[in-house]
Amino acid sequence: MPFNIHDFKSQGLALNGARPSLFSVSIPQGWPYMNSSNSQVPYTAKASSLPQSNINEVEVGYFGRKIKISGDRTFADWSVTILNDEDFVLRDMFENWLNLLNTHESNLRNVPSNQYKCDAYIRQFSKDGTTIREYRMIGMFPLEVSAMDVDWDATNRIQTFNVSLAYDYWVPVERDSSIPQYT
């Protein structure tokens, strides 16, 4: 097959390619242990990723040979990079959430076992602002709030921190029917 730029444009990236910078992360309001600061997440979530999942393999031996059978699905932890403002409101929110799961002093949980999780969403947008893909992370809670560096030489930057989150599973949110579907 000879190279033809017109074939690439019409068949390879017919819609001009998805842009990684057009995304939004949200944690809906209404979770009883979170304040209104979670409404800032869509504006300060600087980087993240669309969620990952894996199908593990099960190896079964028979007369010295192994065959592979599909196993259970697993979901990798999800990470979000947050821009820190001088009020530290989002960092406080995630630190307080971690403290509800396990307090610093007493090593106890301060929230009922069925109420420390919530759902989160990540959306990717087209260049015209339409949502082209959306995922819902179900049963999410934080595992880690990263350290934040302070440095006299770090001028002209906004401080950031990473939050690592676990969740039970993700599901794609139904797509707009006007967008071409995968076959």
Image (cartoon, grey):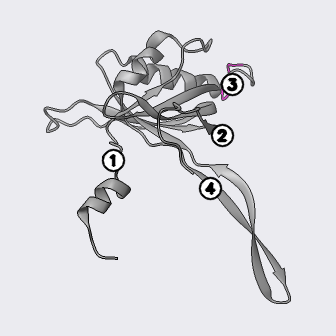
Mark 3 to mark 2 CA distance (whole Å): 23 Å
Image disc number at residue 54: 4
The label nearer to you, 4 versus 1, is 1
Write the start and end of the magenta stretch as one range. Answer: 106-111
Residue that mark 2 sits on = 169
Residue at image point 32% right, 42% down = 19
- Residue 101, relative to residue 70: is it above or below? above
Mark 4 or 2, nearer chain start: 4
The amino acid sitting under disc 4 is Asn
Badge 4 marks a residue whose secondary structure is: strand
Mark 2 or 1, nearer chain start: 1
Check whether the beta carbons of the residues at disc 3 and disc 4 lie within 8 A of each other.
Answer: no
Residue at image point 42% right, 39% down = 48
Residue that mark 3 sits on = 109
- Residue 1, relative to residue 104: is it above or below? below
The label nearer to you, 3 versus 2, is 2
Badge 2 marks a residue whose secondary structure is: strand
Q: Main secondary structure of the magenta part?
A: loop
Q: Is residue 45 inside the magenta stretch?
A: no
Position of the N terminus, as image quadrant, is bottom left
Count neighbours of disc 3 (C-alpha within 10 A) and say few if under 14, some if 14 to 19, many if 20 or more. some
- Residue 156, relative to residue 37: is it above or below? below
